[in-house]
Amino acid sequence: MDKEKWRSYWKTLTSSNLGLIGIGILITFFFIAIFAPLIAPYDPSERIAPPLMKPNGSFLLGTNDVGQDIFSELIYGTRVSLLIGIIAALISIVIGCLVGVVSGYFGGKIDSLLMRFVDLILVIPFLPLMILMAAFVGPSFWNIILVISIISWASPARVIRSQVLTLKTKGFVEAAKSIGTNISTILRVHILPGVIPIALAQFVMAASHSILIEASLSFLGLGDPFTKSWGTTLYYAQARGAFLTDSWIWWILPPGLLITALVVGFALTGFSMEEILNPRLRKGRS
Amino acid sequence: MYKFKFLYSKMIQYVLVIFLILTLNFLLPRLMPGSPLAYLAGEDVGLMTSEEKQKILDKHGLNDSITTQYIDYLSNIFTGDFGFSYQQKVPISDLIEDRLPWTLLLTGLNLVISTILGVIFGAMAAWKRGTKTDINLLTGFMFLSAMPSFWIGMILVSLFASKLGWFPVFGAETAWADYQGMERLLDIGHHMILPLITLILISVTTTFMTMRYSMLNVLGEDYIQMAKAKGVKEKTIKYKHAMRNALLPVATVFMLSLGFMLGGATVIETVFAYPGIGRLMFEAVVSRDYPLIQATFLIITFSVIIANFIADILYPLLDPKVGKENG
Amino acid sequence: MTILQVENLSTYYKTDRGEAQAVENVSFSMKKGEMLGLIGESGCGKTTVAQSILRLIEYPGRIVSGKAYLDGIDLLTAKQDELEKLRWKDISVIPQSAMNALNPIYTIGDQIVESILIHEDVSKATAIKRTEELLEMVGIKKNRFKNYPHEFSGGMKQRVAIAMALSCNPKLIISDESTTGLDVLTQAQIIALIKQLQKDLGLSIILISHDLPMVTSVCDRVAIMYAGKIVELANTQDILKHCSHPYSNGLLNATPDLSNPDKEVVSIPGSVPDLVKPPTGCRFYDRCKARMNVCKEESPDLKEIRPDHFSACFLEGGGYYHVQ
């Protein structure tokens, strides 16, 4: 897409209230993630107070079982959750795009082979599969990303393939083919501009899924214990029985709310992106 | 026969999936860095003498050629032998036998209830599209699907089990109580309410969204207009003409979400310490009991595939196009 | 005897830019046992007229004003429960595309039986028997009662739809572009079937179409619509021989004539006016070859220029003598 188109795309996106709220939420979280050291009052890895303190003036959300500040832990956790979500989504979308474009554009045997494979992956329950793989590769920041993205590309690949199929039947692609334009030019000039907006919306959706999956994996103890995400915080809260006392209010409630807010932010942005791409949805009638 | 062709192609797909996950399961411990010993016999392998190591290697046939190992592995699985859990010191098949019924009970109920609720709410939202009811339902379900499933469970436990004491905090039945008959049934029901509600809350959104979208499409179809023109009553149009058609995509999504539901059970069972397969998988992960992790994964996937296949067999009852010949 | 009397019907559609006057001030009547053709190009409002009479207009559309008396009862003000009783019993439809108008998950027999049972106090066995007769009547073997829509070809589905329209012996049948999407041969068969049934059973039918030769070959009278209004209404012979309105003339000239292969086919230049902001004067003004100053200022009403021949044009004789 050229600059003009991007501008109108952005304009439509921000003109919808929901899209605006979504983008607002995302910007807030990016801000928190980038300036975490300035916002967090303590180093989250340091034991700076007695364990299991109630919230008070100096420890907004109290302390955990080893005396670390929960508030600071959550502020730094924003970095981990956001980063894992985004990187994992990015990798799955890149793989998804590659598979989708190759499959859709070339069709035939490659297409049926790739799509068959995608179908196989989609049948396997993804969370148990990820748990299995995460258990084998061991808990670390990059392993979690690897495990999420190695499985999450399948469904975007399907979406992108169907978009390529639609584009392929458009007059200008057939025209370009018939005058002998080479493949890379057709892909670059005609196919990619139609794929990128869809891929972008898919990316935003994938990010929200990745964040939830990361939280689940971390909650099951498969997260990196040294870079604590929100899910890891919840894992420790569960393991230390925070739900048995009042401490659930400051130890369990806040991380979950943060995850929900971030996922809502991505989802709202994604919905409004899809709405722009599919004006049929915008009218509210089918 | 179209129906059989359809089932046949589905069956090939499922056989391929089974083959794929079995191969993955076989390869994972052998491809990972380090000796496969650690994955088969636990992490205290470092303390073993070389003689002991040799014994384990022999027992698992790890000195055989890779093809022999593979064939042995497959034949073991198909005879129901999933190996030995070195942490719990029992054959894995025994553990699975204990745990599987609980998971089937929980997810089975969840499947039925959340599908019914999703269909009803989805149809309602579509029927009243654009109204407050529709928007409220949409917003509610969107927030619900943005929450981490296990967190919903944790909040429910904290609030209703721990704080208010209405429900037990964990387990599937009261330990050592030795209830019989009706009493036991009530006890099990009492333990199941919170995990079940959690599972329903996380599962219902997909059905709702699909049903709403599909119902909107159906309501725009000519045959709905036609039914109106025929003087069919609104209620009959809604239930007989629109809903039945709108259910078709829901059935497809239903199959896809089976895996999601069983996966969801893994985390939810963990939150409620519910003694199902999912909880077993978590226990295995925590103690790095690799054969057990693999076995639970296999069982969950097998269940999904079996459920899928049953759904495939039932699907033609809904859709006459698949049910009849020369479709 | 008049079976249907439509008076000053107006139906608008809400759009992003305002309300489009899809049907504006349409009046006509038809006699029992008559076949009336309603003709015009796509978007001229002919289907909207049909849907308004059937009260099937839904948001974003709305019926702004008008009356439609079917055998004395105003369809446009009838209450919902009255309407449910009236529909199909008194007025039925052969729909635009029967492919989509039949519910895919019920057998065609069940769907016809359903419409009988809703409106008539008969046993199911009677309804089934009647359905089988109806199917035979439209040329479908009765043993196909238990088949699903997808097991029929397009033409066959259209026949099913006709049988369904006949199921309660309605006073009026609206055939709304019933042959779109069918091949030419099947189209001719379906139209011949409708005409045959109309003659045999004495049906009153409104035939909506954009196919002028087809309409003039089977209809007793023809109403020509342009941009939401009826511009000319007369019996078929008058339309063919004494066509009056400049638009009707244009339409005739734009249609090839098989009996006169030398005839030059001339299309009407220009395009349909914007119905959100329709011109204050005649809606055909921009494209009219015989336009006058008055046409820009005032909108012509439908008036009788000869016995039973109506035209909406300011020219003397409705324009007939001037356009020749």
Image (cartoon, coloured by chain):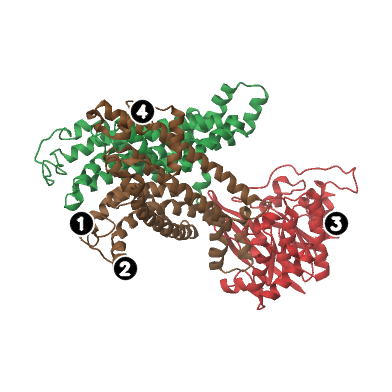
Chain colours: A green, B brown, C red
Mark 4 or 1: in front is 4
Q: Which mark is residue C242?
A: 3
Q: Residue at x 29, y 29 (%)?
A: B53
Give whichever of discs 2 and 1 has the lower sequence position: 1
To which chain does the residue with label 3 belong? C
Disc 1 marks which residue?
B162
Q: Which mark is residue B181?
A: 2
Q: Position of residue C309 (x, y in %)?
A: 80, 62
Foreground: disc 3 or disc 1: 1
Between the C-alphas of marks 4 and 2, the distance is: 49 Å
Measure the alpha-carbon separation of dots 4 and 1: 42 Å
Q: Circle 4 marks a residue in which chain?
A: B
Q: Earlier in the sequence, mark 4 or mark 1?
A: 4
Front residue of C261 and B66: B66
Looking at the image, which residue is at 27% across and 46% down?
A257
Q: Residues within 10 Å of mark 2 (few under 14, many from 20)?
A: few
Q: Quadrant of residue A153?
A: top left
Q: Chain of mark 2?
A: B
Q: Secondary structure at mark 4?
A: loop
Give a yes or no on whether discs 2 and 1 share a subunit. Answer: yes
Type of amino acid under label 3: His
Q: Is residue B59 left or right of residue A104?
A: left
- Choose top left, top right, bottom left or bottom right for residue C67: bottom right
Q: Amino acid at mark 1?
A: Ser
Q: Residues within 10 Å of mark 3 (few under 14, many from 20)?
A: some
Badge 3 and badge 1 both on one subunit: no
